[in-house]
Amino acid sequence: MSSYRPYLALFSGLLLSLCVCSSGLADNLVFQETGFEISPLQAPPHIGGSQPLTMLLPSEHGFSANVNVQIQAFEGSLQEYQTLSELQFKQMNIEVLSAEIQDGILQYEYKGFYEQKDLHWYAKAVKSGPYVYLATATSLEKNWQQNRFELQQAVDSFKLTN
């Protein structure tokens, strides 16, 4: 029986790769500028929330401008999510520069002092079922103008696939 183990392992590996490729999990995240690609981690949303993606620019002044995607459990409407967010911003002395719901998408831009840093954010929230999918860009305020294009382009490209 041990003479069949290498073939069994090879067959199992081929079968697994066929399953992965046919299920769509083989699509990689491609980072052309830095010269690599990687397979994304896949997990369904859950009630505790998750942050399935974080992308960082090189650190400047001790902070890496970034874009992340969070999935937050939220049963209410997008308008109720906006109201709650603005209440939280007010409690944190965060200034909302713009906020708009259009075509089922909430767009935000805001700035303020958080965790000992002057920060600038740009965000896009989309409601799907019992979840809000939130793509957020964060930069130091003093670097916002130089990082703005890349960060906003990443957030603006976010869309739900199902």
Image (cartoon, grey):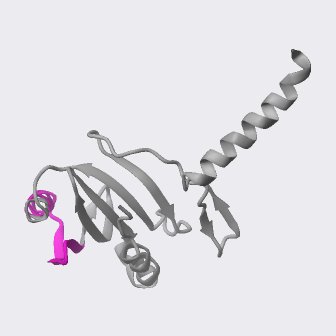
Work out whether 87 lies above or below 3.
below
Residue furthest to the right: 3
Residue 128 placement, left or right of 155: left
Name the one closer to the observer, 124 or 2.
2
Which of the 4 quarters of the picture holds residue 117?
bottom left
Residue drawn at the location 43% of the way across and 84% of the way down:
149
Residue furthest to the top: 1
Which of the 4 quarters of the picture holds residue 44?
top left
Work out whether 22 lies above or below 47.
below
Q: Verify whether residue 94 appears in magenta.
A: yes
Name the one closer to the observer, 108 or 105.
105
How many marks can you see? 0
Residue 16 placement, left or right of 133: right
Quarter holding the C terminus? bottom left
Residue 140 placement, left or right of 100: right
Residue drawn at the location 34% of the way across and 75% of the way down:
141
Residue 33 placement, left or right of 127: right
* Residue 75, percent from left and from top: 14, 49
Which of the 4 quarters of the picture holds residue 122?
bottom left
Q: Which residues are magenta?
A: 83-109
Work out whether 155 lies above or below 5.
below
* Residue 95, percent from left and from top: 16, 71
* Residue 5, percent from left and from top: 84, 23
Name the one closer to the observer, 66 or 154.
154
Residue drawn at the location 17% of the way across and 50% of the way down:
74
Q: Verify whether residue 160 appears in magenta.
A: no
Name the one closer to the observer, 58 or 3.
3
* Residue 67, percent from left and from top: 42, 65
